[in-house]
Image (cartoon, grey):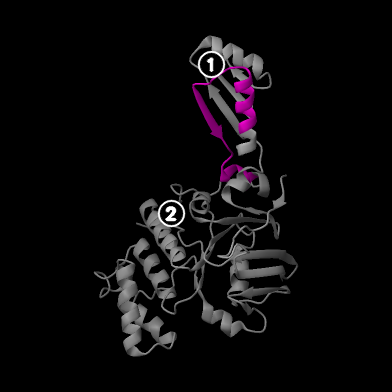
């Protein structure tokens, strides 16, 4: 099974490493005899999206609960927003916002009242709370529904309100624990847009998800959690290069050129009927250049060159050994419209 941990690549304005919004070394957690986390190391640059992937029961939510001070780790150290998790928990709570899989919205009161309640919990003055609530309701396109009971909201509206409530205190770091579970594709894409806007504004987003497309679309860095350990970390492209199956496909329209190419590229898999060759390739610039140099040396030009790399589904299966089909954006068992 492929296994790799790649260093994070965030860079600061001066060219050095970007400051870490979240860092952890050796986090451990057990529940009874079950070891859930067995030495987790993380470094998440400020102003980025970090996605944690893993099968059900891998410990993704446990990581979020530890880093957001909801439960304590059995071992290891962590800093969130520059504050030590063990000794400065209150400062950590002031720097973060958390949105879980299930909405914290109170359906018995209006969207506006939910926002004002959150402002009160964040100790904002009445005037400041009203101002912040109005700005966030507008930002999340909830102004028209603000006076209606939240129980009348669609799933996507409730999720937007949930995140808006999380932002009332102005957190620099937001934990989104499977925030799009159960949403229809349109609502999920709207949520992606909101997350991108948050990061553009400088917020750091720690995202757990089972939707591989979601991680591919949003995350600057992705870590795969399995068996209590992070078995791989990197950008989506870096992770895709960890598993076999990448190749370059060359298509020809001239049979003579195709025959010449088969002689020059003896290691390629042939499809004589389609006049195509398939060459193992990881898609890197160096590997592509090597293929092109071989064609140039033989005086051959392909009519079409296509690079095929494994997707995150392949990565997920290879790194976790899972036989369960990971969730996809259009495959929710339960859709909330």
Q: Quadrant of residue 73?
A: bottom right
Mark 2 secondary-structure assignment: loop
Residue pushed farthest top? 256
Q: Is residue 110 visible?
A: no
* 117 sits left or right of 272 in the view: left
User: Where residue 170 is drawn, which disc sits there?
Assistant: none
**Residue in the picture at 48% in, 51% down:** 217
Magenta segment boundaries in residue numbering? 289-317
Q: Nearer the viewer, mark 1 or mark 2?
A: 1
Towards the viewer: 207 or 335: 207
N-term mark: 1 or 2: 1
**Residue in the picture at 44% in, 62% down:** 195
* 140 sits left or right of 326 in the view: left
Residue 140 locus on image (x, y percent): 34, 67
Q: Is residue 170 above or below residue 309?
A: below
Residue 120 locus on image (x, y percent): 40, 87
**Residue in the picture at 53% in, 56% down:** 219
Q: Is residue 282 above or below residue 326?
A: above
**Residue in the picture at 44% in, 77% down:** 170
Q: Quadrant of residue 135?
A: bottom left
Towards the viewer: 130 or 209: 130
* 315 sits left or right of 175 in the view: right
The residue wearing badge 2 is: 334
* 327 sits left or right of 288 in the view: left
Mark 1 secondary-structure assignment: loop
Rounded to the nearest angstrom, the CA distance separating label 1 from label 2 is 44 Å
Residue 229 locus on image (x, y percent): 71, 59
The residue wearing badge 1 is: 275
For the C terminus, which image quadrant?
Answer: bottom left
Towards the viewer: 55 or 274: 274
């Amino acid at each position: 099974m492929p296994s790799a941990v790649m260093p994070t690549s965030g860079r600061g304005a001066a060219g050095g490493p970007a400051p870490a919004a979240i860092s952890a070394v050796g986090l451990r957690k057990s529940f009874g005899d079950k070891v859930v986390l067995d030495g987790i190391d993380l470094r998440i640059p400020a102003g980025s999206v970090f996605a944690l992937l893993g099968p059900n029961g891998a410990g993704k939510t446990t990581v979020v609960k530890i880093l957001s001070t909801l439960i304590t780790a059995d071992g290891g150290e962590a800093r969130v927003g520059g504050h030590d998790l063990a000794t400065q928990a209150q400062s950590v709570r002031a720097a973060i916002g958390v949105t879980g899989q299930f909405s914290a919205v109170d359906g018995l009161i209006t969207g506006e009242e939910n926002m004002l309640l959150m402002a009160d919990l964040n100790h904002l003055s009445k005037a400041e709370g009203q101002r912040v609530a109005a700005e966030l309701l507008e930002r999340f396109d909830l102004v028209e529904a603000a006076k209606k009971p939240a129980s009348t909201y669609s799933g996507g509206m409730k999720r937007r309100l949930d995140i808006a409530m999380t932002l009332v205190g102005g957190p620099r770091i937001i934990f989104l624990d499977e925030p799009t579970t159960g949403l229809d594709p349109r609502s999920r894409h709207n949520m992606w847009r909101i997350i991108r806007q948050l990061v553009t504004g400088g917020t750091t987003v720690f995202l757990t998800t089972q939707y591989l497309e979601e991680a591919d679309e949003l995350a600057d860095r992705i870590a795969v959690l399995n068996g209590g350990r992070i078995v791989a970390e990197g950008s989506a492209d870096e992770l895709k290069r960890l598993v076999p199956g990448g190749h370059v496909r060359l298509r020809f329209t001239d049979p003579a050129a195709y025959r010449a190419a088969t002689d020059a590229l003896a290691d390629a898999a042939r499809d004589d009927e389609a006049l195509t060759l398939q060459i193992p390739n990881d898609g890197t610039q160096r590997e592509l250049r090597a293929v092109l140099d071989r064609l140039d040396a033989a005086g051959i030009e392909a009519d079409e060159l296509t690079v095929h790399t494994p997707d995150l589904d392949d990565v997920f299966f290879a790194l976790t050994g899972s036989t369960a089909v990971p969730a996809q954006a259009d495959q929710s068992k339960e859709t909330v419209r």
